[in-house]
Amino acid sequence: MDLKKVWVWVLVLGSVYFTKANAQITIIPELSDNYVQKLIDTAKVNYPKVKAYQYRIEMAKNTIAKSRLSLLESVTVSYVYQPGQATIDPVNPSTSYFKGLQAGAFLNIGSLLERPFVMKQAKEELLIAKNEQVDYLQALSTEVKKRYYTYVLRLTELKIQTTALQVSETLLKDMRYKFEKGEEAFDSYNKVQSDFTNHQASKVQAEANLFLAKADLEDLLGTKLQNIK
């Protein structure tokens, strides 16, 4: 059998394998909106930077509460208690010393006028913190989707390379059998063997790409992918 006939055999046998695996060689069945949403929700709960944005919001709320309480700082109340009755200074009769309870209130006008601006700034900081959180959560959702789609792509590529390797292995076994019987030339056998080696390398690379994609996705999720059902 010449080399041309070998490749005809490769195409025929390969078409059989790829026809059987045709339902798997697509990323569409792997994509699930519900599952993607579960991944996004998991990332929002576990990813540390999400918690940092929530802490900022809580700090802004505390600043507002503190600003409201600080209104009391504008008013100072003091008292003096001296038991007994009032006495007159004999040297200076116009000066008298009162006995009993004396109380007074002092208003810090500057501090009082400053309060509305402090309160406004605190509310603006809360609004900014909330907007930043919304913006980040949207960016996080997009990144989770991208990494998940990349993971599914790598998974599909691995399936393709696995099928191709199976086809190549079958062809190599058949070629080896015929070569050992003297029905095939060494060049034809060597070509099929080289193709098999290349498919092996491609499958290993596809596995590595899948592991890397999975690690990138799990970095956002804060947990193993298999823990999310």
Image (cartoon, rainbow, N blue to C red):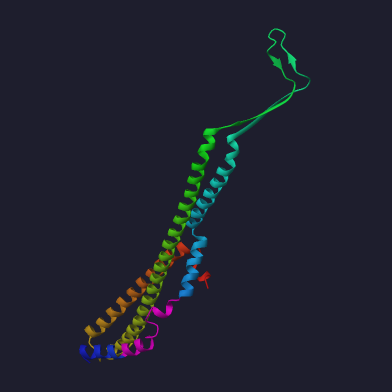
- Residue 102: within the magenta? no
Q: Which residue is located at x 34 percent, y 81 percent?
A: 164
Pick out the residue farthest to the front.
Answer: 94
Left or right: where does residue 192 sit relative to residue 150? Answer: left
Quarter that holds the N terminus: bottom left
Question: Could you tell me how many numbered marks the image carries?
Answer: 0
**Magenta segment:** 13-32
Residue 222 at what x, y percent from top left? 50, 62
Q: Based on the displayed image, in which of its 4 quarters is residue 168 positioned?
A: bottom left
Residue 167 at what x, y percent from top left? 34, 85
Residue 23 at what x, y percent from top left? 39, 85
Q: Which residue is located at x 35 percent, y 71 percent?
A: 205
Q: Nearer the viewer, residue 81 or 154?
A: 81
Residue 2 at what x, y percent from top left? 20, 90
Q: Nearer the viewer, residue 215 or 1?
A: 215
Pick out the residue farthest to the top.
Answer: 91
Left or right: where does residue 55 sit relative to residue 187? Answer: right
Q: Based on the displayed image, in which of its 4 quarters is residue 99 positioned?
A: top right
Q: Based on the displayed image, in which of its 4 quarters is residue 220 positioned?
A: bottom left
Left or right: where does residue 199 sit relative to residue 88? Answer: left
Q: Nearer the viewer, residue 184 or 169?
A: 169
Q: Which residue is located at x 54 percent, y 45 percent?
A: 63
Q: Nearer the viewer, residue 27 or 194?
A: 27
Q: Which residue is located at x 35 percent, y 80 percent?
A: 165
Relative to 138, does residue 126 appear above or below in the rendering?
Answer: above
- Residue 23: within the magenta? yes
Pick out the residue farthest to the right.
Answer: 84
